[in-house]
Image (cartoon, helix red, strand yellow):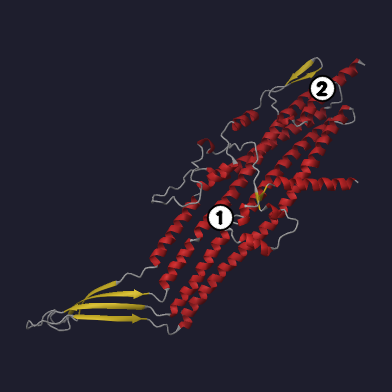
Amino acid sequence: MFTLKIVNKRRNLLSVTILSLACFSVYAQNNRTTVGLGDSEVSHREVSPREISSREVSRKAVLSFGQAIKTAQKNDPWLTGNLHKQQAIESMSNVAGELPDPKVSLGLANLPLDGFDFSQEGMTQLKVGITQMFPRGDTLDLKKRQLRTKSEAYPYQRQNRQAKVAVTVGGLWLDAYRIQQCIELIQKNYSLFEQLVDVAEASYSAALGTTRQQDIIRSQLELTRLEDRLDTLAQQKNHFEGQLFQWVSDFMTYEGEGEGISKGVSVDEGIGAIDSSLTGLHDFNFGTQIPQIELFNAELIYAQKWIKPAQLVKYFSKHPSVMALDKKIRATKTGINLAKQKYQPQWAVNASYGYRADDLTGKSRADLFSVGVTFDLPLFPENRQDQEVKSAISAAEAVKTDKILLLRKMLSAYLSAKGRLLRINERKALYKHKLLPQIIDQAEASLTAYNNDDGDFSEVVRSRIAVLNTEIDELAIEVELQKIILELNYLFIGSSASSVEKVSSKAMMQTISQNIMAKTEIKRK
């Protein structure tokens, strides 16, 4: 009878330790814990190097989601290069609208070969001439207009680039944040699993209770697997940090030497260079809170009916990438009119002055002045002008095809992202209201069965691993949700409704949660 009391007492102490693992207090600090076992005590381990490393990271300056995006946009040399290209085309447009430089000719005409005497022959003269070319039709105005139109596409390209950078850097930040939170979650469970191993070993060494050697081996195996998961996650974290570093680092940022070179790029000028504590090659700190990104056109996306493609095109028509292609299309259409100018002649006006010396008798000779006009005649346009016009028309149609392909790609991206968003919202609600609570209930039931001699220790360990995996899956779902919102917001950049119809996704999530709970009640009935 006395032995049974000791066994029950130790089992209850073990249950208390396991319950501390089963509750959501995994986020509490567990630096040093003492678990009582009858008349003896098992002292918990000292703080592990993994926890020390985690605390060192937490003390570093935080690279927030917004800071990462704004810094990447500011330090993007592509924007500077794009601005240079725009300035080059604008300068060329100013040149294209001007007449070509006149040509000056200087020559000695009709010099006699028998004596090379300048005054011997009356036809001998020193001739100075000037020629001015006049391009065909409206060629100058059309060239200037075409280059101006091309230059107008570059601001839209920069705006599109900034939006793409936001999606890319935001996705990398969210992936790195997910890995960091997974590491912290496992580390906080790691100490409790070590408690579990210590208690199991103490119970087994006392030769009391139902703890078996295989239970100890199983608990140690799960602890080793956690160590391997931590190493794997650290490897993945280094991977995402390396990719993120190329965006947030200001290393080798181009500094223009020309006046006004760095001006005109549409970025936040007030953001300075990234803090030196964040420019290391590893161990970024991404904070503890996941950003809740506002969804553009939430009412449209969460609508029950799928909008028709023709209506979606109206939203996408104001997208920077589409606007840039529109400018390119306009430029190619101007190119068609430019090619048609080849049917008109090209004119040139020339004038010359000829100086003649006095004759051999000293009599003065009159100087000569000449003026003339030259022009070409496009008499055979089939092999030249017609082909040039056809080429310009084909080039314009090719750009229109690029626009169609871009719109189809955006439509496809929207349909894919919307479908994934709706499904992942359902998964999020399912995890929050059903799956995670059920798995926690299962873990508690396994513990209760073990306390009542109706379960084994391995099942308790497995149920706690299942809870940990579910929490990690729930975190991955939340991160994936924010990444999908980033993708959808990119598609609606520039649309008029995107700046007005910003609806928080909380209301949408509540509706989805209610639908899931209603379906559950119906199935129960």
Which circle's residue, 1 or 2, is located before the other in the chain?
2
Q: Is residue 524 above or below residue 9?
A: below
**Residue lying farthest to the front in this orientation:** 500
The quarter of the displayed image where residue 278 is located: top right
Tag of residue 13: 2
The image position of residue 467, as x and y in percent, is 77, 36
The disc labelled 1 sits on which kind of residue? Answer: Asn
Q: Nearer the viewer, residue 152 or 436?
A: 152
The image position of residue 426, as x and y in percent, is 76, 48
Q: Is residue 47 above or below residue 293?
A: above
Q: Nearer the viewer, residue 72 or 47?
A: 72
Whether residue 147 sits left or right of residue 410 in the image: it is left
Q: Nearer the viewer, residue 114 or 349?
A: 349
Q: Is residue 242 visible?
A: no
Q: Is residue 201 above or below residue 438?
A: above
Whether residue 200 sits left or right of residue 83 in the image: it is right
The image position of residue 188, as x and y in percent, is 70, 31
Q: CA distance from mark 1 to mark 2?
A: 61 Å
Q: Circle 1 sits in a helix, a strand or a loop, which is it? A: helix
Tag of residue 160: 1
Whether residue 521 sits left or right of residue 370 in the image: it is right
